Image: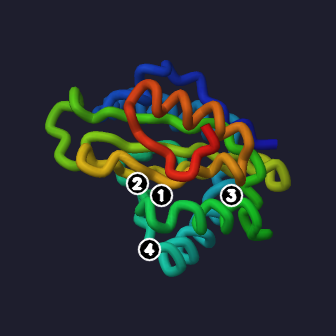
Amino acid sequence: GCVSLLPIPWAAFRRAEVSDQFYKSTKRMCVRNCRKEDISPFFETLFPVLETKFNVEKDASAHWDHSVIAKASVLRDLIIFLRDDESSKMEMLLDVVGIDYLGFQDYEGPRFAVEYVFKSISHPGRRVRVKVFVSEQDLEVPTISDLYPIANWQEREVYDQYGILFKDHPD
């Protein structure tokens, strides 16, 4: 099977710049445990559907996984599709993460982002990250706590740390 967990220092996920040497060594670790054919066709088939239906774009900063950038207005529909569609079946929400880009060197764009990490149980080795940028003027994204109960706590944590509101959150 494909082992997609990589021994990457947590701080590397938080930096905007990841050195080429680090990226290449990380890629080698993944290649050793994952066959490209296990993962790539999945995303190469899925991405055009997501692009057409939800107007997402590939996250250029995602070097070692499948990540899309979506607008908050389509977030819930996108996540319902990822969870329920037979081709993806993202049954597990692994994490909801808030990102503050204030200290990122040479970064231009909205200050905050909320990132969702999903995993398929039906199709082992398949993971997708969904990122939503959040401006300081509009610190709100829709809740997904009714779709994935674990999001309840994770969204509250993002709110506590970054002040990002999750519309219709039960708490």
Q: Which mark identifies residue 132?
A: none
**Would residue 138 be found to the left or right of residue 97 on screen?**
left
In the picture of the structure, the residue carrying the numbered disc 1 is: 68
Judge depth for marks 4 and 3 and give the one in front.
4
CA gap between label 2 and label 4 equals 13 Å
Q: Would you place residue 33 above or below residue 134 in this image?
A: above
Q: How would you rate the neighbour count of disc 4 (Cα within 10 Å): few for under 14, some for 14-19, many for 20 or more?
A: some
The amino acid marked with disc number 1 is Val
Provide residue 108's location: percent of width, then percent of height: 17, 46
In the picture of the structure, the residue carrying the numbered disc 4 is: 55
Residue under the image location 21 percent in, 49 percent down: 109
Provide residue 44's location: percent of width, then percent of height: 57, 68
**Would residue 1 be found to the left or right of residue 69 on screen?**
right
In the picture of the structure, the residue carrying the numbered disc 2 is: 59
Q: Quadrant of residue 164?
A: top left
**Mark 4 / mark 3, whichever is N-terminal:** 3
**Mark 2 / mark 1, whichever is N-terminal:** 2
Tell how many labels. Answer: 4
Judge depth for marks 3 and 2 and give the one in front.
2
CA gap between label 4 and label 3 equals 26 Å
**Mark 3 / mark 1, whichever is N-terminal:** 3
